[in-house]
Amino acid sequence: MTSAIKPPPLEKGGVVGIAAPASPFDRDAFARGVRALEESGYRVAFDEGIFSRDGYLAGSDRRRAEELARLFADPRVGAIFCARGGYGSQRVLPMLDAGLIRRSPKIFVGYSDITALHGFLGGECGLVTFHGPLVTEMGGMGPGALRALLSSLGKTAAWGGIASGLRAVRGGRAEGKIVGGSLSVFCATLGTRYAPPTKGRILLFEDRGEKPYAVDRLFSTLRISGTIGGARGMLLGRFVPPAGWSGGDDAYQAEIRRIALDATDGCPFPVLAGFPAGHFPGNTCFPLGVRVAVDGGEGSVSVVEPCLAG
């Protein structure tokens, strides 16, 4: 496994590149996000090809892979934000040049389908990345929240506490590098060369629209693949109920906790629920690939090492 590479911090007023490595997106929401970034004092860079459409993809696999390569290679770009998730990131992984990315590390931010890219960038390239909001969501964040996110991406010290008041599904304390994202996308990479390393890690999962039996299937995949058995802890982010779910949100979250508890039966590590990650307005930004401390007694998670160079 490649040793960890921490990207340089984002300078105030620096250039933010935008990529669409998955699905096409709403242009009005994109424009609002771009405007919010510019009003926060940052310059924005993207090619017109980002608006391409090829069915449920934002243009061809080649276009999307080359867009990512250009942004990583561009010395002006200090961070890369993803326009949207959706579907398609996994398709471009074989076309990406890990050597180029290691030579020109950048802050990389996104979530949902972008989980596949987080796995590649962390596992194949050794790059610390950031699970965080998409450009099409940034226009609705509010200037204060967006400024705080951008400011954190310029912070070279350890971030410290990133979550508190979490619910201990299973108590205990643990420390390890954090890895994960969308549960369904993460599981889709298992058994491939693009699956991120999980031994000794803190696993973080969130998802949307999955019925409880489907979530159970995914956690069963994690268990029988040995992914859970090699971990040091687990964090459950926001799981959004599927359309037509009539049992209420509390019942759905309780079912997710029950499934996770069952899947981790016999594992001597903490499992905490309520981590602020996922498909909801409170989705926070946090690093992947750096050490975090999980405390089931306090219901807290802290980043205990710097995630940016310098």
Image: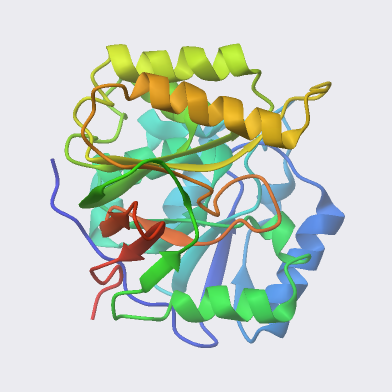
Residue drawn where x is 23% and y is 28% of the image: 267
Would you place residue 223 above or below residue 43 in this image? above
Residue 110 versus residue 243 in the image, above or below: below
- Foreground pick, 300 / 117: 300
**Residue at the spot x=65%, y=52% of the render?**
83
Which of the two residues, 248 or 306, is positioned nearer the viewer here?
Answer: 248
**Is any part of residue 239 visible from this angle?**
yes
Colouring convention used in this rendered image of the protein: rainbow
| Residue 230 image-quadrant placement | top left
Q: Viewed as shown, does residue 71 lie left or right of 147?
A: left
> On the rendered structure, is 165 left or right of 126?
right
Residue 191 visible, this orientation: no
On screen, residue 197 above or below 34: above
Q: Quadrant of residue 39?
A: bottom right
Q: Is residue 118 left or right of residue 51?
A: left
Residue 271 percent location from the top left of the image: 37, 40
